[in-house]
Image: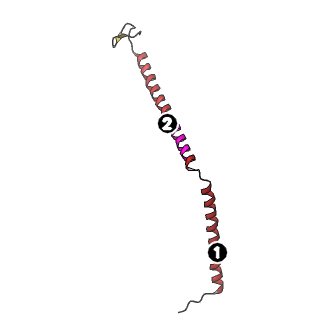
Amino acid sequence: MTLAISPKRTTANTAFWMRCSRRLSAKADWLSRESANLPSSAEEHRRRKRDASRWRRFRDLAQDWHELSAVRDFLVALRSMDFTTTAEIDGRSVEE
């Protein structure tokens, strides 16, 4: 059995592969332009350092809010207690 390849089919295959080659070439050009736009390692280091600083400040603020909430709850509990100003806690009067 012999396989006959028509000239029309060969031309279509060639055109297909030429289109693929052009697409790949365009993609490679795009990738090289994109890689040229990447930040330098020094810029990346500064960005990471800035992000770490922002995250640290955010955590500090969250901790402050948590502590403030605990203090607020403690004050509410103290105000709800029924005691006289002459009462003593740990050797100190409530008035102090």
Q: Which residue is mark 2?
A: 56
Between 94 and 29, the one lying in front of the other is 29
Please tell me which of labels 2 and 1 falls first in the chain. 1
- In the rendered view of the protein, which quadrant contains the C terminus? top left
Q: Is residue 82 left or right of residue 24?
A: left
Q: Which residues are magenta?
A: 43-57
Circle 1: residue type? Met
Where residue 28 appears, as percent x and y from the top left, is 61, 64
Between 9 and 73, the one lying in front of the other is 9
Which quadrant holds residue 82?
A: top left
Query: Residue at the spot x=48%, y=35% of the render?
Result: 59
Q: Is residue 46 magenta?
A: yes
Query: Residue at the spot x=59%, y=53% of the render?
Result: 38
Residue 60 position (above or below residue 87): below
Where residue 68 appears, as percent x and y from the top left, is 47, 25
Q: Is residue 13 left or right of residue 71?
A: right
Q: Is residue 43 left or right of residue 66?
A: right
Q: Residue furthest bottom?
A: 1
Query: Residue at the spot x=33%, y=11% of the render?
Result: 91
Which quadrant holds residue 77?
A: top left
Between 39 and 86, the one lying in front of the other is 39
Circle 2: residue type? Arg
| Main secondary-structure element of the magenta-colored stretch | helix
Query: Residue at the spot x=41%, y=17% of the render?
Result: 78
Where residue 63 appears, as percent x and y from the top left, is 46, 31
